[in-house]
Image (tube, rainbow, N blue to C red):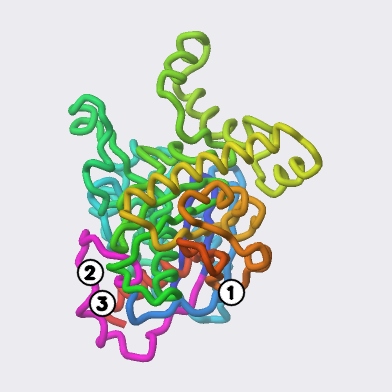
Amino acid sequence: MLVLVVNCGSSSIKYQVREVVPAGEEPQAYTSSMPAINENVTLDRATAGVEGGEVVTKGLIENIGTSEIENHTQALEILAQRLDEELGGRTIDAAGHRVVHGGERFSAPVLVNNEIIRAIERLAPLAPLHNPAHALGLRAIQKTYPGMPQVCVFDTAFHRTMPEKAWRYAVPEEWYTMHGMRRYGFHGTSHDYVTGKACEFLGIPREQFNAVVTHLGNGASATAIRNGQSFDTSMGYTPLAGLVMGTRSGDLDPSVVTAMLERNPQLTAKELDRILNKESGLEGICGDSDMRAVQQHADAGDQRAQLVLDMAAYRLAKYVGAYHVAVGGAQALLFTAGIGENSPAFRALVCDQLGALGITLDPELNEHTEGDVTRISAPGSAIEVLVVATDEERAIAEATAALVWERVGQ
């Protein structure tokens, strides 16, 4: 099956086409174990029996909403023309969409219909920069590829297993009941995927696996994995909460927000939100959001660059320690995503602060990771430390194929 994996932004569409095949057996042999819509389920269960295979083609369409490309429908028409050329006459069988926010409704991949698209649109207040674009992409594919099955995979879905004590905020009840103010969590597809890969590598049944997963890219989050499921996570109502990130502040006293609004009458809530999301984090402290560049500046003696690295590592180490307690003792600490997979210096900076947990790194292994999963902890380390390559597109493609095979037929 050829699956088009789509990530629609407000002004761009990132896409990838993957070949997904049954893993040694016909689809009918595994469909009975597929999840029902809205059943809490991990991706390694949801995609049992399929393999994400090779990337056939990928690309990016930008400048949507300009005179060059008016809307998402036109962008999908351009994409269809590209795919006709790049696929050599082969046709797309299904589309899988990354959707940032599934709210409290969606806890597993779902097959798309008009009601599902309307539900995603109704969740727009929770993700105003993302969900409207996802809905536009879904409707555009309906128009460009009439009748083709589509599946949504939600970033928030994996975190629907969190207990209420973890996701509730201590604010007036009506803030939650009327406005949905609670912790949702993000990066769920990645956290879920690498958890499954780590269990496979370590030979631990998923339902017996306790760990801390750190997804470290320009956006960063940590998740406490208890019995193979999300128990707590650092991002909250929005992706702004938690760790120090490329351009996001992470955790801060809410009174900072109200104080800045009071002291700067010209500053609007929208502008302050933009500053906290786009001009803070690494960018706000040392003027650069790229961890590689920040590390180079620090190595050259830039004190502000070193300061923000120390801040980011310290914040993450605090979360690791807290989540070690939350899961009743972590068996593993996982690093993934761009920084987590590619910055041995930052991994060492974090782990050097975790000696109280009995964590020790093997410097040689930390410097030279290879393959999908690498153990970088020293033999005597009390907790395994792994670098696990994430592949959200593969996870989405596999979930899409599995659900389409189960619901629609091959």
Q: Which residues are magenta?
A: 17-46
Q: Which of the two marks, 3 or 2, is nearer to us in this view?
A: 2
The number of numbered discs placed on residues in the rendered structure image is: 3
Disc 3, SS: helix
**Which label lies toward us, 1 or 2?**
1
Query: What kind of element bears circle 2?
Result: loop
Label number found at residue 35: 2
- Callout 1: helix, strand or loop? loop
Distance from disc 1 to disc 2, alpha carbons, whole Å, reads 30 Å
Asked if residue 335 can be seen in this view, the reply is: yes
- For the C terminus, the image quarter is bottom left
Image x and y of residue 11, in percent:
53, 46
CA gap, disc 3 and disc 2: 9 Å
The answer to whether marks 3 and 1 mark residues whose Cβ atoms lie closer than 8 Å is no
Q: Amino acid at mark 1?
A: Gly
Judged from this view, the residue extending furthest toward the right is 300
Residue 120 screen position, x and y as percent: 31, 48
Mark 3 to mark 1 CA distance (whole Å): 31 Å
Task: Kindly indicate whether the residue at mark 2 contacts the one at mark 1 (C-beta within 8 angstroms).
Answer: no
Residue lying at 63% horizontally and 68% vertically, measured from the top left? 365
User: For residue 289, which quarter of the picture?
Assistant: top right
Residue located 43% across and 52% down the image: 187
Select label 3 or label 1 by which is in front. 1
Identify the residue position indicated by label 3 in the image.
Answer: 406
